[in-house]
Image (tube, rainbow, N blue to C red):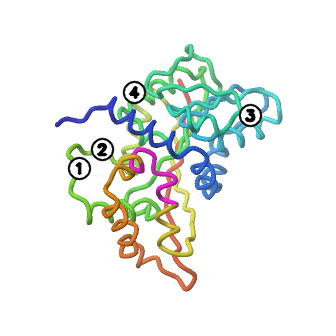
Amino acid sequence: MSFDRNQFKRLERAGYDRLGPRYLAAAGTRDDIATALLAAAALAPGQRVLDLASGPGLLARAAAESLGGRGMVLASDISQGQLACCPDLPRVAADGEALPFADASFDRVLCGLGLMFFPDAEAALREMHRVLRPQGRLALSVWGCAEEVPLIECALACMRRLLPPPRVARPSIFRCGDPDWLQRRVASADFHAIDIRRVDFTVAFADAASYWQGFLDIAGGAAESLARLPAEKFQALAAGVAEELAPHATAEGYRLTSTVLIASALRK
């Protein structure tokens, strides 16, 4: 069976629709990433800003605050369920690989931890370039390599250990984590002045159960697939993830430090 990008998008949409406001609370633990991404975006009052893969609008709200009430931030996501969590923002449901906006519509495009979820990352980058004005700036974040992101990899490793291989492999959410790979892809979309930086952040969990729930609350399509498992398999994963978490144990529970890459670039 070959990979079906449309089915993949449907699963992601269903997963994030299912998560609803739970994702809002879980994503709030990543403030350091949002701060670094907004610094890379160099926002200024009066700008028009598009926030792709906006989810419940955390980054979009922070961007709007940076504009000081002058300008506009539009939140966009494939999930209507996520956008329903930010009724205070201008918002539109859209596929990041085929944006419904005119050429040169925005001064800034933001994409926080979203590029790796687009099946065709190159197409998404070309769309980001298209909707930016000349010398407009792109700022995005992506997960680092798997070994640098225990926040996600512990759960995925447990799934690989306890579940049979999927019939069709999903695009890895770590595929953008190589700085050289990311540099080439951004450059191939005709951006220049590309800058890529690493940012580390730490999340603590009281026990394995709270880690597992935290993973489910941000996992989108993966969480949707897990929800369809028989109860005994799902429970085995929840109990078994402690094995993967063991290297990160502390006296208070677990402490996981993970890495993201922050990339910024200008439209030619």
Q: Decide: few, some or many residues near mark 3? Use Cα within 10 Å; few <14, some 14-19, many ≥20.
A: few
Magenta-colored span: 214-223
Secondary structure type for disc 4: helix
The residues tagged by marks 1 and 4 sit, at their Cα atoms, a distance apart of 26 Å
Q: Nearer the viewer, mark 3 or mark 4?
A: 3
Secondary structure type for disc 1: loop
Query: Residue at 73% of width from left, 27% of height from top?
Result: 72
Q: Decide: few, some or many residues near mark 4? Use Cα within 10 Å; few <14, some 14-19, many ≥20.
A: some
Q: Residue 170, labelled with which disc?
A: 2
Q: For the residue marked with disc 3, what is the amino acid? A: Asp
Is the residue under label 4 in contact with that under label 1 (CB below 8 Å)?
no
Q: Earlier in the sequence, mark 1 or mark 4?
A: 4
Q: Nearer the viewer, mark 1 or mark 2?
A: 1
Q: For the residue marked with disc 1, what is the amino acid? A: Pro
Q: Decide: few, some or many residues near mark 1? Use Cα within 10 Å; few <14, some 14-19, many ≥20.
A: few
Q: Nearer the viewer, mark 2 or mark 3?
A: 3
Q: Residue 166, labelled with which disc?
A: 1
Q: For the residue marked with disc 4, what is the amino acid? A: Ala
For label 3, the residue is 88
The residues tagged by marks 3 and 1 sit, at their Cα atoms, a distance apart of 39 Å
Is the residue under label 4 in contact with that under label 2 (CB below 8 Å)?
no
Q: Earlier in the sequence, mark 3 or mark 1?
A: 3
Query: Residue at 79% of width from left, 31% of height from top?
Result: 45
Between 180 and 199, the one nearer to me in the picture:
199
For label 4, the residue is 123
Where is residue 83? Give x, y as percent.
Answer: 61, 34
Q: Earlier in the sequence, mark 2 or mark 3?
A: 3
